[in-house]
Image (spheres, helix red, strand yellow):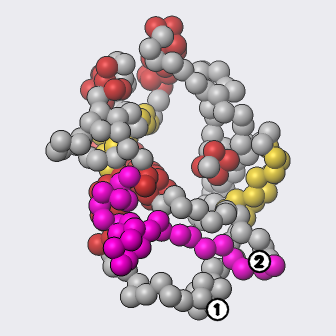
Amino acid sequence: MWTDVNVGMRSTMLDLRNADQAKALDALVPRADVFMESFSGRGIERLGFGVEEVARKRPGIVYLTVRCYGWDGPWKDRAGFDMEALTVTGYTMAEGGGGKPGIPPTFPMPEGESPTPAFPPTLVLNDYIAGYLGAAGVIAALRRRARQGGSYHVRVSLSRAAMWYQSLGTFPSTDFDATAPEHRMVPPETVRGPTPYGEVHRLAPLVKLSRTPSGWRDPLVIVRGSDRPTW
């Protein structure tokens, strides 16, 4: 997953329990446009980087928080991840059927077709969709900030995301041939590039901008934690 979702990103590691390393992050905040965290409960606040503290240090910040179980109720401070959110919302029971839970599958293109799939079959669903929703919320907040000013807090819940796409409806049956023409995946546009982890083959950007064409740094993916904590 690291090579899939961290294309073009820089990466550094800081232990915020260490005073000197916390100062390094603190020095980055005044020039940041977006601050994202996914600590469980109030962990990030205890480390001095809660939303109110960051907004005080950097007026105009867009602060994204991701939680598993939302902000209310007895589980609001509980840690959790993708499949736990799918389970507690009933998604896995609906996916499995017959009283037996199931994890949502994804299907690769049939073997031998070209181009080959840029992503393998995966059982991870919620992390990706919640990430897309978080990114959409950040973009909306940045647009509003450009027009109206202000700081913004974007909140995304894995469990609430699972409840949302369940509400969109389901197929009456999953008993179909995933390789049949009417169900076959459209061959996507992809990019390839060498990285310290080997060649990465992944989906290309879906949006094409005429004046500001997209692009990624070379290599596409760097070693995790290999950058210095500086702009």
Q: Position of residue 19 (x, y in %)?
A: 46, 8
Q: Position of residue 186 (x, y in %)?
A: 65, 80
Q: Amino acid at mark 2?
A: Glu
Query: Is residue 189 shown left or right of residue 70?
Result: right
Q: Quadrant of residue 183?
A: bottom right
For the question of whether residue 94 can be seen, the reply is: no
The residue at 51%/18% (across/down) is 15
* Residue at the limit of the structure toward the top, as seen here: 20
In the image, residue 131 above or below residue 110: above
Q: Position of residue 78 (x, y in %)?
A: 30, 38
The residue at 34%/46% (across/down) is 68
Q: Earlier in the sequence, mark 1 or mark 2?
A: 2
The residue at 56%/70% (across/down) is 106
Give the residue number, with chain letter if any, for mark 2: 111
Residue 181 circle label: 1
Query: Is residue 123 shown left or right of residue 99?
Result: right
Mark 2: secondary structure: loop
Which residues make up the magenta segment? 84-113
